[in-house]
């Protein structure tokens, strides 16, 4: 197996704030960005591992600095050393004896960990000649649990619990993989409902999305209740009542405000309210969940949930009806696997967070693995889809009729085109001149 000979990181920023793509109640002007990691190897044909962590523009240089601080733990390692002891490799990053003080397992440091860990999975999958979801499906239950650090979650999920879940699905997993190849995996769209869009643009985008076969629509809410009522009415007029509507407040409210605001939107029958309040407020989410349950509105969160421990508490406290893992806010594939398995045990469907740049490319792999090996169901499960920036990837997502089609190329689908990397590198690229 190859040896990792170098790790580089680049600050890549797309000026999306110019068009208000991605605008919501809190992130009013994001420039979708990434700390972009490449692992170079001595393997055949320039074999490389690519990984990124998503950011919103300013501050990406801080994440790049954190990646550089962790670099020494990866360079010089044989790929086999990492893949045969994935959980201990993962812990070597998250529990580095001095750097750990900056986290632990949260914020900038964990974003950096996600980029590096995902690059290792990309490298492993490319070395095996498989897309990451296939690599995951083909691993045995024992190999999968050996990739997970169970520290801090054994009160909710033990290694034995995880093995039991995976073994129960092992004999039928390839059948479901074949099914995915044919049908794809269901998705929902956030593209029509950004807060900065005009009413006319929202209407037009809804019509286009319906024509493309979309059945689930999410809009941004939170700032102004009259404005939200108007926008929800517009969307319902366009999509009707058969299709589902979801709402997303991006942490804008206090707990009481969230409850009061959503009661006023209840007439539009939102399926969920996403990120009603601070991502750290487990008991606050539980209070919102309890108050809104009689209205049929579920609570969803996760894109800012910092690690498996907070997800554990959200589930233990019955604070979420939908779990929205983020592929690189958590510390990469390894930690994500543990959250999927906990969600299965607690009976909470996972609907991963996507959009940004590269997040759709990432999460399709995770959700397809979930379908094959963990939940064995698409009931109440959808992957978010946003139609921005896919053109910069070598192996972008492929959509058909509101479904993700399974990736077939080796790797984690996250490798960007060299020309895009050069053009959007900050501050030297042409896009920033
Ligand atoms: Mg969101």
Image: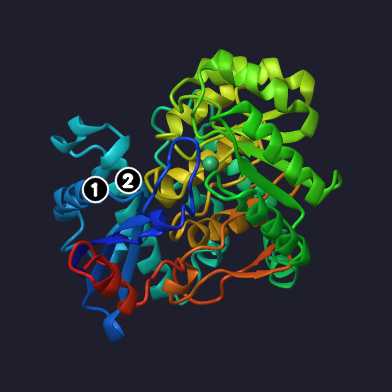
Tell me if the residue at label 2 has its CB under 8 Å from ligand 1: no
Residue 157's place in the image compared with 387, above or below, is above
Residue 85's place in the image compared with 262, above or below, is below
At 55% from the left and 36% from the top, the residue drawn is: 160
Where is residue 196? Give x, y as percent. 52, 47
In terms of depth relative to the viewer, which is nearer, 19 or 161?
19
Residue 102's place in the image compared with 375, above or below, is above
* Label 2 packing within 10 angstroms: few (<14), some (14-19), many (20+): many
At 86% from the left and 47% from the top, the residue drawn is: 242
Quarter location, residue 369:
bottom right
Find out whether the residues at labels 2 and 1 contact each other: C-beta distance under 8 Å.
yes
The residue where tag 2 is placed is 111
Quarter location, residue 186:
bottom right
Where is residue 161? Give x, y as percent. 58, 35
The residue where tag 1 is placed is 63
Quarter location, residue 163:
top right
Tag 2 secondary structure: helix
Q: Classify residue 227 as left or right of residue 365.
A: right
Quarter of the picture containing the N terminus is bottom left
Q: Classify residue 170 as left or right of residue 52.
A: right
The answer to whether residue 189 shows anywhere in this view is no
């Amino acid at each position: 197996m190859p040896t990792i000979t170098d790790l580089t990181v680049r600050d890549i920023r797309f000026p999306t704030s110019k068009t208000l793509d991605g605008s919501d109640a809190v992130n009013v002007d994001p420039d979708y960005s990434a700390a972009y990691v490449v692992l170079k190897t001595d393997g055949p044909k320039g074999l490389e591992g690519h990984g990124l962590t998503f950011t919103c523009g300013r501050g990406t240089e801080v994440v790049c600095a954190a990646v550089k601080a962790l670099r020494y733990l990866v360079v010089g390692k044989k790929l086999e050393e990492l893949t045969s002891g994935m959980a201990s490799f993962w812990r070597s990053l998250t529990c580095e004896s001095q750097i750990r003080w900056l986290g632990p397992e949260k914020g900038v440091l964990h974003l950096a960990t996600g980029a590096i860990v995902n690059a290792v999975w990309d490298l492993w999958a490319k070395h095996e000649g498989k897309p990451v979801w296939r690599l995951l499906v083909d691993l045995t239950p024992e190999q999968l649990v050996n990739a997970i650090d169970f520290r801090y979650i054994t009160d909710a999920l033990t290694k034995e619990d995880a093995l039991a879940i995976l073994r129960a699905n092992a004999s039928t997993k390839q059948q479901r993989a074949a099914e995915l190849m044919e049908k794809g995996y269901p998705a929902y769209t956030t593209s029509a409902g950004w807060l900065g869009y005009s009413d006319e643009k929202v209407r037009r985008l809804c019509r286009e999305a319906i024509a493309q076969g979309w059945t689930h629509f999410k809009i941004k809410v939170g700032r102004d209740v009259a404005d939200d009522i108007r926008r929800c009415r517009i969307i319902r007029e366009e999509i009707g009542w058969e299709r589902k509507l979801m709402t997303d407040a991006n942490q804008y409210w206090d707990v009481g405000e969230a409850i009061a605001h959503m009661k006023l939107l209840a007439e539009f029958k939102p399926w969920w309210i996403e990120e009603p309040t601070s991502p750290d407020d487990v008991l606050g989410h539980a209070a919102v969940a309890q108050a809104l349950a009689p209205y049929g509105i579920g609570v969803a969160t996760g894109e800012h949930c910092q690690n498996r421990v907070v997800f554990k508490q959200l589930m233990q406290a019955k604070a979420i009806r939908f779990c929205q893992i983020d592929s690189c806010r958590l510390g990469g594939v390894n930690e994500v696997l543990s959250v999927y398995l906990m969600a299965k045990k607690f009976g909470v469907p996972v609907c991963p967070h996507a959009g940004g740049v590269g997040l759709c490319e990432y999460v399709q792999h995770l959700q397809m693995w979930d379908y094959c090996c963990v939940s064995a169901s698409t009931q109440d499960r959808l992957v978010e889809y946003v139609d921005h920036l896919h053109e910069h990837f070598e192996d972008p997502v492929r959509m058909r009729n509101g479904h993700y089609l399974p990736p077939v190329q080796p790797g984690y689908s996250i490798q960007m085109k060299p020309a895009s990397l050069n053009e959007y590198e900050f501050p030297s690229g042409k896009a920033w001149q």
